[in-house]
Image: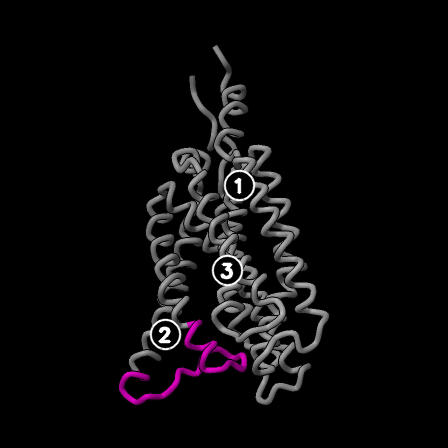
Amino acid sequence: MATVRDEHRVRQPAAGLLDIRVAVLVWVVAALALAAAVPGLVIDGIYAGPRSTAEILRGYDLVTAVLVVPALGVAALQARRGSLPGHLVTAGLLADLVYGYAFYVFGTGFNALFLLHIVLFSAGLTALVLTVAGLDVGAVAEWFRGIRHVWPAAVALGLLAVSLGGMWISAGVTNAVTGTVPPGSAMVETDQIIHLSMVLDLAIQVPLYAAAAVLVWRRTGWGYVLAFVALVSGIPEQLSYLAAMPLQVIAGVPEAVPLEPLEPVILAMYVLGLVMLLGGRPRHAAEITS
């Protein structure tokens, strides 16, 4: 009869194993993202349209090249080796790329990288769906069994859902009544970027945060999956905002500000929720009795 430790070794790799074909697709997405981000950073004027939008995209490029691409490559490799956290982080980073490249595809005009951005958006979305579909949700619930504190993640996600949803719904109602265009964030944004942000946040982000908050509070397998996707993707998204604001100032965009004080607080909420999920898992969480 196998020991508890032996059975743990058998099950753990199967829980986090990423299919080789999906892993290859993820690495292709990472390579393409790097190939798109570097020209965006080093070639001035490559993005058509307002300078404010170009600097927002360069903020995404910076975080993608420095953080997301290396982390995605490592996470997918760890997932191939049987790491369940690696599998979950891979899904979260892919979600960040899909969200970010929606702005490149739908928020700007034609440019030299436009076709590459379309490929990245499509391939990233496909990789995200396949990565999540390849998860064993029961094994996720088992891996997190006995976690000490889920409330920081649930509260952070709930606050994000309520605040983000409340902001955009209020802005939408005001627009419907008065015709006033919502102000957006502290970044200098065009009406097109504000419109797209509102659509993506209300259609995708707010439901994701709300569902993750409720389900992770109930300690379900899907709750942990959605929480990881929301929290991991939220970190580079916030870092991109934080990078874009000083880039707008450096580029001389009128009314640009170097920092919005609330943005680091939001970033801390993502980080705290993720750390508490990972740090609160007891050593025996994935052990199997025989």
In the rendered structure, which segment of residues is drawn in magenta? 174-197
Q: Nearer the viewer, mark 2 or mark 1?
A: 1
Q: Nearer the viewer, residue 230 or 70?
A: 70
Dot 1, how many residues are within 10 Å of its Cα: few (below 14), some (14-19), or many (20+)? some
Query: What amino acid does circle 2 point to?
Result: Trp
Q: Nearer the viewer, residue 191 or 170?
A: 191
Query: What amino acid does circle 3 point to?
Result: Gly
First along the sequence among labels 1 and 3 = 1
Mark 3, secondary structure of its residue: helix
Against 287, residue 49 (above or below) is below
Query: What amino acid does circle 1 point to?
Result: Val
- Circle number at residue 234: 3
First along the sequence among labels 2 and 1 = 1
User: Label 1, on which residue?
Assistant: 22
Tell me if label 2 and label 1 are in contact, CB under 8 Å: no
Q: Nearer the viewer, residue 79 or 286?
A: 79
Furthest toward the top, the residue is 1
- Rendering coords of residue 243 (x, y %): 62, 70
